[in-house]
Amino acid sequence: MTTPALSVLDLIPVRRGQTTGQALRASTRLARLADQLGYRRFWVAEHHNTEAVASTNPPVLIAMLAAATERIRVGSGGVMLPNHAPLVVAEQFALLEAAFPDRIDLGIGRAPGTDPVTNWVLRQGLDETAAVERFGQAVHEVLAMMHPGGAAITLPGPGGGPGRTQALRATPSAVGSPPVWLLGSSDYSARLAAEQGLPYVFAHHFSGQGTAEALELYRSGWQQAGHDGSPTTFLTVNVVVADTEAEAVRRARPHLLAMVALRTGGGFGPQATVEEAAETELSATHEQLGVQMSAPWVVGDPATVADRLRGLAAEFGVDEVMVHPVAGAAAADPLDRTPAREETLQRLAEALA
């Protein structure tokens, strides 16, 4: 089996007793390590009003992480476009591309990335259905405005007829624009990515369900649309690597407890330490839910995890795997580091070398 290239997805987790600044420093160190180990990309997510996640503003984080690294591509996984004006997103990523040429990725999604109240605040009370319905047009606008030539915008004239047309550029003198990826966990984004000829990522790390079907829709839709080149995608997977499978499972439990709590309405507070998670007992029903949710995760010793990732890459026909390192922290770990996540990246790179 072919060995896939490796990338990283980071939600910038916040554990109990840790400040936002400490969590950011831990993720910056993780990004530097990924850069040194030859990982291809380091993407950050967009989540709001969540005690366990510091990844609230991808453009700010991307600027910080790109400045702290040298080679690795840094991007969003992703910007939730209905939360933002397309021009604002285009301006942010045009500037990032100008500052770090050929190192920026713009991943775009359409989920709210937060709770209903925060979602209402983000969208200024605008109808969520309308924002989602115009997602495809918003993606087109971002692409047009980030293009070095800009976009031609025609304002409505008197009586609703055509008015004045004006050029609109995301930045004055661009020489290129970052690639735009569509992200999704449903058929919609797969079809839209194929129609618009864009790279696409299905959120396999969410549940492990529907990946093959989504990728088939994307690939077949690409051919039907008659685009040049080939459809581009990769696989996202929750991963923990340790010396033994038992230790890897132990390190994965804090994230597992958080996912069960989120699914069952228990909230999403700061992440527990490995020791706290080991002492936490769930009801039989919730424990079984955890088993089901973690079934697609890849958790184990280095050789086992490497073999499983090779197998998944072959199964889904991809040459890149983006790992979400979900290893929890021990109580004694420094607050500005995540040693278990660092070890996951280190041991995995060595095993796949």
Image (cartoon, grey):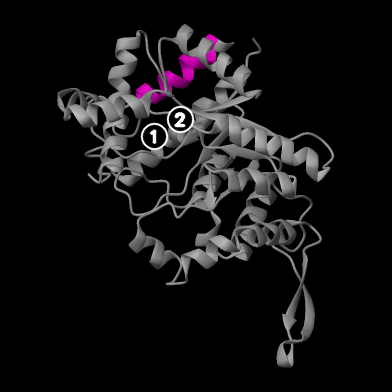
Quarter of the rendering containing residue 262: top left
Residue closer to the observer: 93 or 230: 230
Residue closer to the observer: 121 or 7: 121
Q: Mark 1 = which residue?
A: 26
Residue at horizontal 60%, vertical 57%? Answer: 92
Mark 1 neighbour density, 10 Å: few (under 14) some (14–19) many (20 or more): many
Q: Does the magenta stretch include residue 197?
A: no
**CB under 8 Å between discs 2 and 1:** yes
Q: Mark 2 = which residue?
A: 30
Q: Which amino acid does label 1 sit on?
A: Ala
Which region of the structure is painted magenta?
A: 338-351
Q: Where is residue 12 in the image (x, y as percent from the top left)?
A: 40, 39
Visible residue check, residue 105: no
Quadrant occupied by the N terminus: top right
| Disc 2 element | helix
Q: Where is residue 37 in the image (x, y as percent from the top left)?
A: 56, 21
Quarter of the rendering containing residue 23: top left
Q: What residue type is labelled 2?
A: Leu
Q: Position of residue 69 (x, y in %)?
A: 56, 34
Residue at horizontal 71%, vertical 44%? Answer: 194
